[in-house]
Structures are given as C-alpha cells and as structure tokens.
Image (cartoon, grey):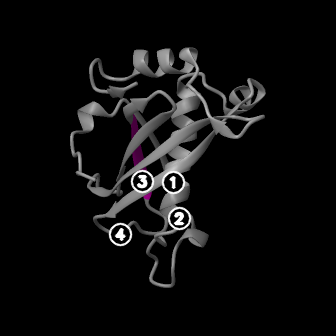
C-alpha cells in the first residue's frame, strides 16, 4: 500500500474525541481501535452521501470487508480530538476501496489505512455488481477523476 498524503483528494472529514476505554495504560489508543475508527469514518461518509446502510440491506445487498491495511505512523492519545478523512479511491464491478487519513490533535497524520469492501447479494452471499445509484452518489461526491476503475 502506498501512502497518500494528499488531503485535497479526501472529500469527507469527521472529528471526535478519543475515549478512555480505547486507550492502554500509557494513554495511547490501542491499535485495534483504529479498525473501529475506520468503520465510524466510512459510515459517516455514507451518511453524508445519503446512503443509509439499512437502506442497502433492505435492497437485498450487504458490504463485507475483504481487506484492511493500516500504517501506524504515530500514536493517538486518550482525550484528544482526532479527525478522519475518507475517500473512495478504486472501484471494480463488485468492490470499492476506501482510503483513510487519521489526524492527531495537532493536525499531523497519524494513520494511513485502506479497506476493500465487496458488495454481496444477501440471499446468495455471492459478489454482486454495485448498485448504480450508490456509485453515482460516490462519483458525484469525489474529486473528479480521482477514482480508478476496473470493471
């Protein structure tokens, strides 16, 4: 995974304060919490685009995480306000790659990560083409030409 430190490509950002239960005894956010942070960022991204996950499920589809990659560049700490930037960087017929930058309270990039989510048809549990409406919303929201596509 190649680090991308071009925040201008990231169209979405959310912020929150880290919690006590997420930290180890040294006050550092445990590495396993970062996966949760990616999910929070991704769900908020969808919400911004008007894509409710429940609506997706009700339509007979679901997303499954097929891959997670994470570069821990520096620690995050308890009771700090952090920011996560999210973008879709790659699309295939059945999957989307999301990239994330997580910034510490000082505004420095602490985490670079990516996830690949595959669209499944709920009744068959088999990969299925991504719904056109969802792809249109993502494409309209992202920086023009910034999503690589492989159909």
Query: In what element is the residue under mark 3?
Result: strand
Q: Is residue 39 positioned above or below 11 on the image?
A: below
Q: Distance of mark 3 from mark 4, alpha carbons? A: 11 Å
- Measured in 3D between alpha carbons, the distance from the residue under mark 4 to the one under mark 2, in whole angstroms, is 12 Å
Instruction: Say the numbered circle drawn on residue 62.
Output: none
Mark 1 and mark 3 lie on one chain; the one further toward the N terminus is: 1
Residue located beneath label 3 in the image: 82
Mark 4 or mark 1: name the one nearer the start of the chain. 1
| Left or right: residue 35 compared with residue 53 | left
Q: Secondary structure at mark 1?
A: helix
Q: Position of residue 118 (x, y in %)?
A: 54, 39
Q: Nearer the viewer, mark 1 or mark 3?
A: 1
Which sits in the foreground, 134 or 50? 134
In this view, the residue farthest toward the bottom is 25
Residue 7 position in % (x across, y down): 26, 38
Q: Foreground: 2 or 42? A: 2
> Residue 80's spot in the image, x, y percent?
44, 61
User: Which numbered disc, 4 or 2, marks the residue that appears first in the sequence?
Assistant: 2
Q: Earlier in the sequence, mark 3 or mark 2?
A: 2
Res. 33 mark: 2
Closer to the N terminus: mark 3 or mark 4? 4
Q: Mark 4: few, some, or many residues within 10 Å (few <14, many ≥20)? A: some
Q: Which span of residues is magenta-colored?
A: 81-87
Q: Is residue 108 left or right of residue 23?
A: left
Specify the quadrant of the image occupied by residue 22: bottom right
97 part of magenta stretch: no
Q: Are marks 4 and 1 in contact (CB under 8 Å)?
A: no
Q: What residue does disc 4 label?
A: 75
Give the mark toward the camera: 4 or 2: 2
Q: Secondary structure at mark 4?
A: loop
Label 2 vs label 1: CA separation? 6 Å
């Amino acid at each position: 995974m190649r680090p991308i430190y071009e925040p201008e490509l990231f169209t979405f950002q959310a912020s929150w304060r880290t919690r006590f239960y997420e930290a180890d005894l040294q006050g550092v956010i445990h590495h396993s919490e970062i996966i949760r942070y990616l999910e929070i960022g991704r769900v908020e991204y969808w919400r911004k685009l008007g894509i409710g996950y429940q609506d997706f499920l009700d339509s007979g589809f679901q997303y499954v995480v097929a891959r997670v990659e994470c570069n821990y560049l520096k620690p995050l700490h308890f009771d700090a306000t952090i920011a996560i930037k999210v973008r879709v960087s790659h699309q295939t017929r059945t999957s989307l790659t999301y990239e994330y930058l997580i910034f510490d309270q000082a505004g420095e990039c602490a985490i670079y990560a990516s996830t690949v989510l595959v669209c499944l048809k709920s009744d068959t549990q088999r990969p299925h083409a991504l719904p056109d409406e969802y792809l249109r919303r993502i494409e309209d929201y992202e920086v023009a030409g910034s999503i690589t596509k492989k159909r």
